[in-house]
């Protein structure tokens, strides 16, 4: 991955979805670009220890669960099912390997010079790279910080990545923990909790708030909680973990009510700490260019510009949803701005998906946000239980909900829970990007029989003319 370097238009620190997409776009726009990454492979958290390995495990374990519990309704008996965990992990590793190699290929194609080592800003226009062969200094007109994020630690809970793990360790357990305790009922907890529950773990989730999936539409989260509880998740809401002790065999997880008191100790074979992530800027030399981090460690920006001249920031290291496609969009728009163009990201149209079963997908504003903003809105809702394809497939859990401005009918939010909704939400992101009205969606032909018809019926519901219910 090493290459000779001298003077660049742009040096990007961090080779995740933010950094590598910024590099590709910069290359396309004719900027002389370098990418510095301290991991041995490109792709960042997302490809190496995030989106991709987790989805490989989620897909495979969902197939296993379907074969074990979902086939019999169709008269199909799958007997003597078993999982070869080593083979499952090998599939995950092979997927990651292929994709990270692909990113390295893309860097070559777009003439991006890649440096392997830890990047540090050493003053205006200067980045040092400490690699296996020592340290070198790169001169550059612009610097882009794309260093991503790391797990937020929890005092009293020492992560060893074996039994007390972050998401990274939870992607590689050597055996299925009999009892698994998750600290945090957010996206990582529900996704990785699903993986290990399907493989046989008894999963308990300790969540500080009185609800799961904070930030998502409350009605969606409530339905999700009911469905996951039915699958066997044991939710302990409004509780906090005060410490984890390592005993011989089991871990002892001390919990108490979030407001204090009411102590309870849980036994666990493994614990996943998933209480959120925070920007990773350790040893980055921000002080050499006068950048101070803001709330919770985020680097403030205005259209990706930091307060230091020609130093830019994108992805998880700055504000906005911590999502791979958001980092990618930031990267593209930032490269365009550096090249003198008007790169822009519409954060309202960035969708988010929880890849559980059923999936949960959303774009735009939630009902809670609309109420908080005092905006008048109308709601259309349609359950998958009334959708013909969902019934034929036996996938009737969940619903589609569309929120539209009461006066203009512009779609303000879309909230979906159901089988495969993660693939459907892109159409709604497009609708929001194009500032479509709910009537546009309601009058757009949708193929029959598909689950997408539930979305159209929900859009009809905004103006009170849902037809199939
Ligand atoms: P990162 O991907 O974190 O990349 C930053 C890179 O910078 C890293 O490779 C790091 O090694 C490198 N770096 C840091 N400091 C330095 C330095 N000083 N010098 C050199 N290199 C440095 N998002 C989704 O949209 N969909 C998902 O399904 C999804 N699943 C996830 C599952 C898990 C388990 C986790 C943890 C995250 C998931 N995410 C998902 C979030 C997603 O991974 C992040 O939002 C995304 O990776 C952020 O991209 P980034 O480029 O900002 O940072
Ligand atoms: P999260 O913010 O989604 O959830 C963290 C949860 O932990 C929240 O419910 C919070 O209330 C709770 N919590 C916080 N402190 C606690 C405490 N002391 N005790 C108990 N509960 C506590 O964070 P995450 O699940 O760690 O995920 C991190 C980031 O990674 C997210 O921002 C997410 O966007 C990203 N991610 C995305 C995907 C996806 O897009 N499918 C998948 C995985 C991760």
Image: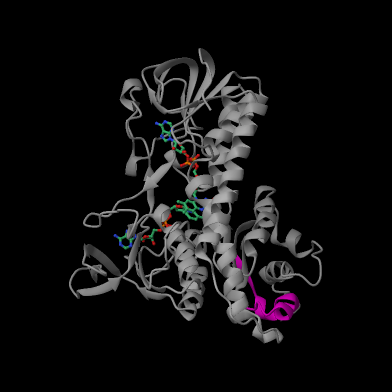
User: Could you say where residue 452 lies in the image, as x and y percent from the top left?
Assistant: 72, 66
Q: Is residue 352 visible?
A: no
**Where does the C terminus fall, quadrant-wise?**
bottom right
Q: Which of these two is toward me, 221 or 39? A: 39
User: Could you say where residue 254 lies in the image, as x and y percent from the top left?
Assistant: 22, 68
47 over 381 or under it: above or below: above
Image point (55%, 44%), residue name? 326
Q: Which of these two is toward me, 272 or 447? A: 272
User: Could you say where residue 90 lies in the image, as x and y percent from the top left?
Assistant: 55, 55
Q: Is residue 158 left or right of residue 361?
A: left
User: Could you say where residue 217 lies in the image, as x and y percent from the top left?
Assistant: 50, 64
Image point (50%, 72%), residue name? 198
Q: Is residue 218 magenta?
A: no
Q: Residue furthest left?
A: 261
Image point (55%, 61%), residue name? 88
Quadrant hosting residue 26: top right
Q: Is residue 175 visible?
A: yes
Q: Is residue 20 left or right of residue 458?
A: left
Name the colour scheme.
Answer: one colour
Q: Which of these two is toward me, 374 or 267? A: 267
Magenta span: 377-396
Image point (59%, 33%), residue name? 104
Q: Which of these two is toward me, 171 or 407? A: 171
């Amino acid at each position: 991955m090493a290459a000779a370097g001298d003077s660049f238009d742009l040096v990007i620190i961090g080779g995740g979805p933010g950094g590598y997409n910024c590099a590709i776009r910069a290359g396309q726009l004719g900027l002389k670009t370098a990418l510095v990454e301290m991991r041995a492979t490109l792709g960042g958290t997302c490809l190496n220890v995030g989106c991709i390995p987790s989805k490989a495990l989620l897909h495979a374990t969902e197939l296993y669960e379907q074969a074990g519990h979902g086939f019999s309704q169709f008269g199909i008996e799958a007997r003597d099912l078993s999982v070869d965990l080593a083979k499952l992990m090998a599939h995950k590793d092979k997927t990651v390997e292929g994709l990270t190699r692909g990113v390295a290929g893309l860097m070559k194609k777009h003439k991006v010079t890649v440096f392997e080592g830890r990047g540090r800003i050493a003053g205006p226009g200067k980045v040092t790279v400490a690699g296996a062969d020592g340290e070198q200094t790169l001169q550059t007109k612009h610097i882009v910080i794309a260093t991503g994020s790391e797990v937020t630690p929890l005092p009293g809970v020492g992560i060893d990545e074996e039994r007390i793990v972050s998401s990274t360790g939870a992607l590689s357990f050597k055996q299925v923990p009999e009892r698994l305790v998750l600290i945090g009922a957010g996206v990582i907890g529900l996704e990785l909790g699903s993986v290990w529950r399907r493989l046989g773990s008894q999963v308990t989730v300790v969540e500080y708030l009185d609800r799961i999936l904070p930030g998502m539409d409350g009605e969606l989260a409530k339905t999700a909680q009911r469905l996951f509880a039915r699958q066997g998740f044991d939710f302990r809401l409004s509780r906090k973990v005060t410490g984890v002790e390592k005993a011989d065999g089991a871990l002892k997880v001390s919990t108490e009510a979030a407001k204090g008191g009411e102590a309870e100790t849980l036994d666990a074979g493994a614990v996943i700490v998933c209480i959120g992530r925070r920007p990773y800027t350790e040893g980055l030399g921000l002080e050499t260019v006068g950048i101070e981090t803001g709330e919770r460690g985020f680097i403030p920006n205005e259209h990706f510009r930091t307060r230091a001249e020609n130093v830019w920031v994108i992805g998880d290291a700055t504000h906005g949803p911590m999502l791979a496609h958001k980092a990618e969009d930031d990267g593209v728009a930032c490269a365009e701005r550096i090249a003198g163009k008007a790169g822009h990201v519409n954060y309202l149209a960035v969708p988010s998906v929880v890849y559980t079963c059923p999936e949960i997908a959303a774009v735009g504003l939630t009902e809670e946000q609309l109420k908080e903003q005092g905006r008048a809105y109308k709601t259309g809702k349609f359950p998958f239980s009334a959708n013909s394809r969902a019934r034929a497939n036996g996938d009737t859990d969940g619903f589609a909900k569309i929120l539209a401005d009461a006066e203009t009918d512009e779609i303000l939010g879309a909230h979906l829970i159901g089988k495969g909704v993660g693939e459907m939400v892109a159409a709604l992101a497009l609708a929001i990007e194009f500032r479509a009205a709910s009537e546009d969606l309601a009058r757009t032909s949708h193929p029959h029989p598909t689950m997408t018809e539930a979305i159209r019926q929900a859009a009809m519901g905004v103006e009170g003319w849902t037809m199939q219910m």
